[in-house]
Image (spheres, helix red, strand yellow):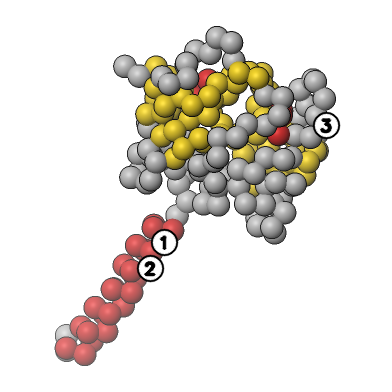
Amino acid sequence: MNKFALGIISIAAAFTLSACSENQENAKPKNENEDHAEMDHSSSGEIPDGLTEAENPTYKVGSTALIKDGHMEGMEGAEATIVGAYDTIAYVISYSPTNGSEKVEDHKWIIHEEIPDAGEEPLEPGTEIETDAAHMKGMEGATVEIVSAETTTVYMIDYTPTNGGEEVTNHKWVTEDELEAVK
């Protein structure tokens, strides 16, 4: 084989391997059902009007818990400090962001108090209603579809992502089912 042909084959192989590597880096994690790149991981810690503190939460304010079921990259397996515990109705929602971004499916979580004029009773799956939640760009003011609802204790937490990211403060929201006691 001459040097010219060997050079062409080497260049083609390098391009092929480079393309495969790039596709792997840009691949979405298989367990993510939405893109949280535009999620405001930290918040001011301000809570919605009408939200009441849990009287006897499983995880007390100031305690730590392990995040066993994270809904963002770097959450699962991280140790969380409980900043607040509240009894409410937590919703999984789908919506089209007001900023024109792609539709978000099965976002966890917004809470009953982040829905103006929601009333007292849990909203039924399929209900379409506007939200005041601002967890992601384009969420506030969006019409959301309720996918599911559960009456639970939700927690505001601080944690350092397991993927080496910066500490997240006042993250809204995780449910009691997503946490477990630190061993």
Disc 3 marks which residue?
Answer: 117
Determine whether label 1 and label 2 are within 8 Å by CB. yes
Give the SS element for disc 1.
helix
Direction from residue 25 to residue 46 in the image, left or right: right
Name above or below for residue 87 compared with residue 79. above
Residues under labels 1 and 2: Cα distance? Answer: 6 Å
For marks 1 and 3, give the one nearer the viewer. 3
Q: Earlier in the sequence, mark 1 or mark 3?
A: 1
Residues under labels 2 and 3: Cα distance? Answer: 51 Å
Residue 64 sits in quarter? top left
Using the image, tell me which numbered label, if any, was put on residue 23. Answer: 1
Q: Quadrant of the N terminus?
A: bottom left
Could you classify mark 1 by the number of other residues whose Cα lies within 10 Å: few (under 14), some (14-19), or many (20 or more)? Answer: few
- Residue 170 at what x, y percent from top left? 50, 35
Name above or below for residue 141 compared with residue 81. below
Q: Quadrant of the C terminus?
A: top left
Give the SS element for disc 2.
helix
Disc 2 marks which residue?
Answer: 19
- Residue 60 at what x, y percent from top left? 47, 16
Residue lying at 24% horizontally and 78% vertically, measured from the top left: 10
Name the kind of residue labelled 3 in the image. Asp
